Image (cartoon, helix red, strand yellow):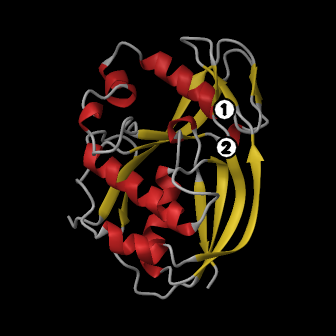
């Protein structure tokens, strides 16, 4: 397979509640992650997904390599469940050894169709390292690095691209519209009882420029998420081509 492909599995799962629970706008992923991890704890699947043994040997510069999955729980926002009810959720798994669920393979090669304008929706709180706001150069760099890290740790290996040159071209793309708002979300650690911030920005941004070569990575972001703390459901994004 070409070095510019990226694969994952999409699984629909359910958890059964022991007591009634209601979800707010952005807190379901934290509960699902905790309960799913608890249900798997002590078994080989827990080690594979929540505590992979090779995480210290990941790509250079990654102090905390990403887990091989993200959760998709936006459909639970505002819903309530009684004791014994089943709570549905979706998980995207990037470990090529997983072999369960629907297989999705993304082509990261340059698009031949010219694209000059896109809208990116940040559907869950998103926080990008390395710059102010959601400038395109920063967004693309975080997408590129995330896809490369996931491939290196769990898939086909590092991306074979010129990071510096493609990064320079990404910085030439500009923001022409921005409708973002800050969201303050906290999670409580079940092991320590401490509260941790998992907020960020939500909303949409319109970018203009020569976007054709970046479109595959923007589309990959729908599956991988982008930015910090994606394992808690952050960084879910969707891209629409406008022109």
Give the mark, 2 or 1, whose residue is nearer the N terminus.
1
Q: Quadrant location of residue 42? A: top left
Q: CA distance from mark 2 to mark 1?
A: 7 Å
Q: Are marks 2 and 1 in contact (CB under 8 Å)?
A: yes
Residue that appears at 37% across and 22% down: 46
Above or below 79: residue 59: below
Disc 2: which residue? 74
For residue 156, side relative to residue 240 (left or right): left
Q: Residue furthest left?
A: 1
Residue at figure coordinates x 62%, y 12% from the top left? 193
Q: Is residue 220 shown above or below 215?
A: above
What residue sits right under mark 1 in the picture? 28
Q: Position of residue 154 (x, y in %)?
A: 28, 44
Task: Note whether 191 is above or below 4 in the view shown.
Answer: above
Look at the numbered disc 2 and give the secondary structure of its residue: helix
Residue 195 in picture, x, y percent from top left = 66, 21
Near-viewer residue (22 or 233): 233
Mark 1 secondary-structure assignment: helix
């Amino acid at each position: 397979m070409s070095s510019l492909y990226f694969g994952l599995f999409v699984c629909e799962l359910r958890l059964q509640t022991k007591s009634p629970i209601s979800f707010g706008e952005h807190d379901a992923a934290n509960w699902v992650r905790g309960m799913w991890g608890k249900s798997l704890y002590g078994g080989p699947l827990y080690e594979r997904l929540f505590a992979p043994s090779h995480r210290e040997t990941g790509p250079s510069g990654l102090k905390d390599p990403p887990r091989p999955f993200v959760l998709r729980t936006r459909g639970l926002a505002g819903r309530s469940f009684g004791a014994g009810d089943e709570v549905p959720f979706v998980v995207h798994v990037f470990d090529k050894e997983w072999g369960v669920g629907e297989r999705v393979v993304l082509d990261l090669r340059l698009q031949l169709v010219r694209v000059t304008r896109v809208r990116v929706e940040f559907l869950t709180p998103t926080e990008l390292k390395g710059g102010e706001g959601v400038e395109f150069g920063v967004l693309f760099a975080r997408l590129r690095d995330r896809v490369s890290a996931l491939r290196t740790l769990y898939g086909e290996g590092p991306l074979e691209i010129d990071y510096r040159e493609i990064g320079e071209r990404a910085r030439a793309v500009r923001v022409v519209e921005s409708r973002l708002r800050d969201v303050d979300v906290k999670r409580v650690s079940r092991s320590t009882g401490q509260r941790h911030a998992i907020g960020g920005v939500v909303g949409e941004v319109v970018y203009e420029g020569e976007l054709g070569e970046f479109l595959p990575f923007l589309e990959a972001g729908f599956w991988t998420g982008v930015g910090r703390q994606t394992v808690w459901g952050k960084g879910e994004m969707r891209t629409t081509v406008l022109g």
